[in-house]
Image: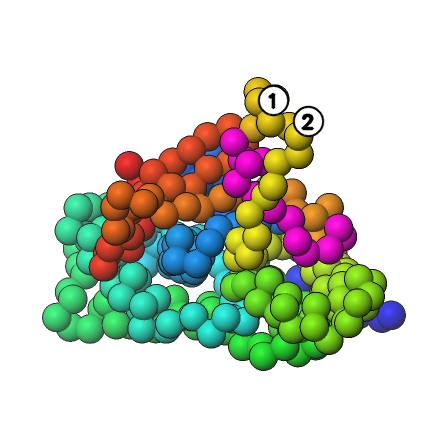
Amino acid sequence: MSETGAQLLARLGSRPDISKVEPVLFPAGLKGKDVFELYGCEGCGKTEMLLHIACSLILPKTWRGWNFGGCGASLVFIDTDYKFSILRLVTLLEKKITEFVEQNQPVTSSENLGATFNSNSGDIEILIKESLERLLVMQCKSSSQLLATLHSVENNISTNPDICVIMIDSISAFYWLDRCNGGESKMAQEHIMNLIVDILSHLVNDYNLVLFATKCAYFERKLKESEKGDERTGPIDLDHSEFLSQKWCRFVKNRLILRKDSDHEVQFSVKCLSWLKKFTVAENGISFK
């Protein structure tokens, strides 16, 4: 297939640097072709975590002399659970901007001496609107619609070199429907899911993107007799139960497991193979401990 110069630039050219997004979660930094699965039960903060990461991505690095430390990157957010709230995202952006301005000073240089940030004059609203222009939100009602959406979104990615991230909330939304529609054939149940993995693999690898996908914990992992009392079985293995296709399992390179602490309403934890972090969710967003 032929491609235009703009498409070639988007596929092979440089994209905004997102390597330093949320170092608490990604101490090694984000890099192109990373695939992250956010796994956990209902209400453990998966969608909130995506919005938290999205804020850092779409905020600019600098704006009118202020170094906000964002990435100025664009992202595609595919909402399959219909949990995405633009009002929540705007609230998080506003809180993040206000807190930053209160705690920092503008960058001083000959070009921006005297730079000010006046919330009363609508500067926050202007900055939020400019940040939201970097966000493309799509909603899907079925796995076949998700598949078609991913194919169609390639046109946006190929013409916009600022798109660095795809977020899917959630990749498991249509599991039960596909399982029902596929009958007793496991191959039929997983057919569309495998096609989704194929197009995601193409987008992530050919366009050097990062993928975040949430997955709900529909099942609890049952230990085999040989695993009981085995110290080699890590805690992250005990908390995860794979039910999507094997192709998806092989595609995921990193898994973050989120859990709500039973003794606290707003306290949660997220863990990977080598670390565990506590965090709280409040009106201002996510705060790590």
Identify whether 142 is placed above or below 238. Answer: below
Would residue 90 be found to the left or right of residue 165 on screen?
Answer: left
**Residues tagged 1 and 2 counted as in contact (Cβ below 8 A):** yes
What is the spatial separation of the Cα atoms under label 1 and label 2, in whole angstroms?
8 Å
Return the residue at label 1: 230
Under tag 2, what secondary structure?
Answer: loop
Residue 94 percent location from the top left of the image: 25, 63
Foreground residue, 282 or 217?
217
Residue at image coords 23%, 59%: 283
Residue 83 appears in the picture as rendered: yes
Give the farthest residue toward the left: 120
Q: Is residue 246 above or below residue 196?
A: above
Determine which residue is flagged by label 2: 226
Give the color scheme: rainbow, by chain, secondary structure or one colour: rainbow
Image coords of residue 168 (percent x, y): 56, 63
The spot of residue 285 in percent (x, y) is 29, 55
Q: Quadrant of the C terminus?
A: top left
Magenta stretch: includes residue 98: no
Residue numbers of the magenta segment = 235-247
Residue 227 falls in which quadrant of the image? top right
What's under tag 2, amino acid-wise? Answer: Ser
